[in-house]
Image (cartoon, rainbow, N blue to C red):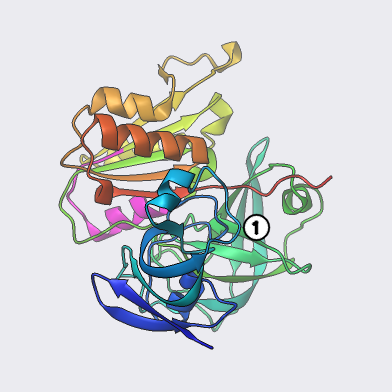
Amino acid sequence: MPNQITIKPSNHVFTAQDDETILDAALREGYVISYGCRNGACGTCKGKVIEGEVDYGIYQKTALAEAEKRLGMALFCQARPRGDIVIECREIGAAKDIRIRTLPCRVQKMRRAAAGIMVLHLKLPASERLQFLAGQYIDVLLKDGTRRSFSLANAPHDDEFLQLHLRNYGGPFSRHVFTRMKERDILRFEGPLGTFFLREDGDKPVILLASGTGFAPIKAIVEHEFRTHDPRPIVLYWGGRVRADLYMHELPERWAHEHSNFQYVPVLSEPLASDKWNGRTGLVHEAAMKDIPDMSGCEVYACGVPVMVEAAHRDFTSQCGLPEEEFFSDAFTPAAPSA
């Protein structure tokens, strides 16, 4: 029997089947609530259950603490209603009218940007174009029924190819890409997905925070902003362990040279002697805090490994005055290597 779900404060109402998560049901009925990984790892879809009960599903403890559950919080990408419920969460209007589709594509070009990083250019059928927002991601659908999520690194206006940045984490799909995939291979994907994209109705200075291949959606956002001539000040902090992790370092350097409202700050945590690094060192979010101790009038967009995103959220909101609602994130949760 369908369960009725009411969203506060909008009072939007939709129904969920017994086997549906709250997020899946909301998306099916056209209501986009904030979400990221869809596997209970990033915490982006966290909201409050005001009335009723839910089955919390399977999730990572770092994304939902027991203390938060006692306060009524749940991860809506995993939680399923047990009867009619009322929830409180952030709704995203900009993504509502973009249709999620399943499409084939061809691997048009493969380029190793660094030893463990591959840049893929995917070509859609001639009659197809993918409508998406800069910062969103797609799920590559594998033959065994699993899926892998990758952010789109190209801006919506530059859509001749879909660009993905892949790090070799050692999982089955990573190994396939780096050892067996070849140009002209055919893939299938679902997308666009996610609510990590620039809120274009704002006028606050923008802080962009990336670690490793978290640069991919940040690249799309920046190139979209240049295209729309957004005058807001934008500063990008891109962090890596060693110099090779900043695999497109010259690109944001060029942006900073060409655009007066854009600033680029690269940061390495463990540079090698061979890197001959003269730039900033340490944790990338701490570099941002040192430069901008008061973030109360800013928007922050953070993408990369969960530990960086979590630390930035915690420290920016608790120490720098960043309003909770002005922190937007996409935490990458790579698939584990197979045994």
Relative horizontal placement of residue 100, taking residue 252 as reference (left or right): right
Residue 233 in magenta stretch = yes
Residue 307 in magenta stretch = no
Residues shaded magenta:
217-235
The reply to whether residue 155 is in sight is: yes
The residue lying furthest to the top in this view is 273
**Residue 249: x, y in percent?**
46, 34
Q: Quadrant of the C terminus?
A: top right
Which residue corresponds to the image point at 66% horizontal and 53% vertical from the top-left? 110
The reply to whether residue 215 is in sight is: no
Which residue corresponds to the image point at 38% horizontal and 62% vertical from the top-left? 34
The residue lying furthest to the bottom in this view is 1
Residue 140: quarter of image: bottom right
Residue that numbered label 1 is attached to? 109
Q: Quadrant of the N terminus?
A: bottom right
Which residue corresponds to the image point at 21% horizontal and 39% vertical from the top-left? 260
**Residue 273: x, y in percent?**
58, 11
Residue 289: quarter of image: top left
Relative horizontal placement of residue 9, taking residue 301 as reference (left or right): left
Residue nearer the viewer, 5 or 70 = 70
How many discs appear? 1
* Mark 1: few/some/many CA within 10 Å (<14, 14-19, 20+): some
Q: Secondary structure at mark 1?
A: strand
Above or below — where is 127 with respect to 130?
Answer: below
Magenta-highlighted stretch: main secondary structure? helix
**Residue 10: x, y in percent?**
24, 74
Residue nearer the viewer, 32 or 104 = 32
